[in-house]
Amino acid sequence: MATFTRGFGRGRDDRDDARIPPGQTLVGDWPVLSAGATPDVAPADWTFSIRTESGQRTWTWDEVRALGVEDVTVDIHCVTHWTKLDMAWRGVPLDRLFAEVDTALGYCMVHSTGGYTTNVPLDDLLHGKAWIAFEADGAPLTPEHGGPARLLVPHLYFWKSAKWVSGIVMQADDQPGFWEDAGYHMHGDPWKEERYW
Ligand SMILES: Nc1nc2c(c(=O)[nH]1)N[C@H]1C(S)=C(S)[C@@H](COP(=O)(O)O)O[C@H]1N2
Ligand SMILES: [Mo]
């Protein structure tokens, strides 16, 4: 039987426990985990690109938002064992961007300003499962949490949710990114405890 810290100002019940993956502990605050320095990116300077076998498509801040912003409430799970329930996010689903590119390649290398990378199969970024997020809990993302824009892939461990996201390079094979190269799992499903390999 796992032990959970209770409270944090919102009611918890047994249904919440069923939403906490194995080996995870509930937190109320929002920890900051960054491998390097926090870059300073202004929305006016931010762009997002997808590079495929046939070229590169780039969107500005306004162009991405014009694709259709949605609000989602999701749980996030960090491989360092914390889980945060019911976070309210605002962003654009990756489906909207991939609707505008043509690719037969099945794997994504996600890139961030500052050099961070993480690999995600394309299928895990489509079907309403991933967003380019601009806001969390009703406020613009702060720089330490990845503002002005980060990836949000809540069904995978949070290291896949690249902060200061700048683009995706499509690949034929699943290549390891920053943490995957250091031994983190290539996929990272928290319900299967795909932590390390
Ligand atoms: N660019 C970038 N994105 C990143 C990281 C990072 O170091 N650099 N850390 C990852 C890890 S390990 C986690 S758990 C989450 C932490 O996000 P947070 O600091 O907003 O909680 O961001 C992920 N995305
Ligand atoms: Mo993490």
Image: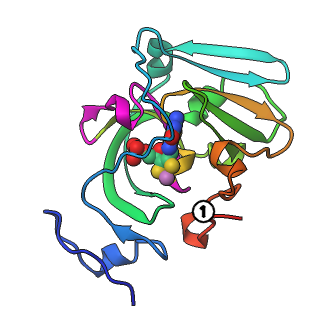
Query: Callout 1 environment at 10 Å: few (<14), some (14 to 19), or many (20+)?
Result: some
Q: As drawn, which residue projects farthest toward the top?
A: 44
Report which quarter residue 195 is drawn in. Answer: bottom right
Q: In the rendered view, does 178 fall on the left or right side of 89? A: right
Front-lying residue, 86 or 27: 27
Does 153 sit above or below residue 69? below
Looking at the image, which is closer to me, 35 or 136? 35
Residue 149, quarter of picture = top left
Find residue 113 and report its image quarter. top right
Q: Where is residue 38 drawn, in percent x and y? A: 42, 29
The residue under label 1 is which amino acid type? Answer: Asp
Q: Residue at x 16, y 64 (%)?
A: 10
Quarter holding the N terminus is: bottom left
- Residue 118 lies, in percent from the top left, at 64, 42
Q: Quadrant of the C terminus?
A: bottom right
Q: Which residues fall within the magenta stretch?
A: 137-157
Residue at 21%, 74% in the rendered image: 6
Q: Which SS type dominates the magenta stretch? A: loop
Residue placed under numbered mark 1 in the picture? 189
Taking depth in this image into account, of 170 and 2 the one nearest to the observer is 2
Q: Does the image show residue 131?
A: no
In the image, taking residue 170 as reference, residue 142 lies left or right, namely left
| Residue 144 covered by magenta stretch | yes
Residue 2 vertical placement versus 34 (above, below): below
Residue beneath the point at 54% across and 43% down: 130
Tell which residue pokes out farthest to the left in this image: 9
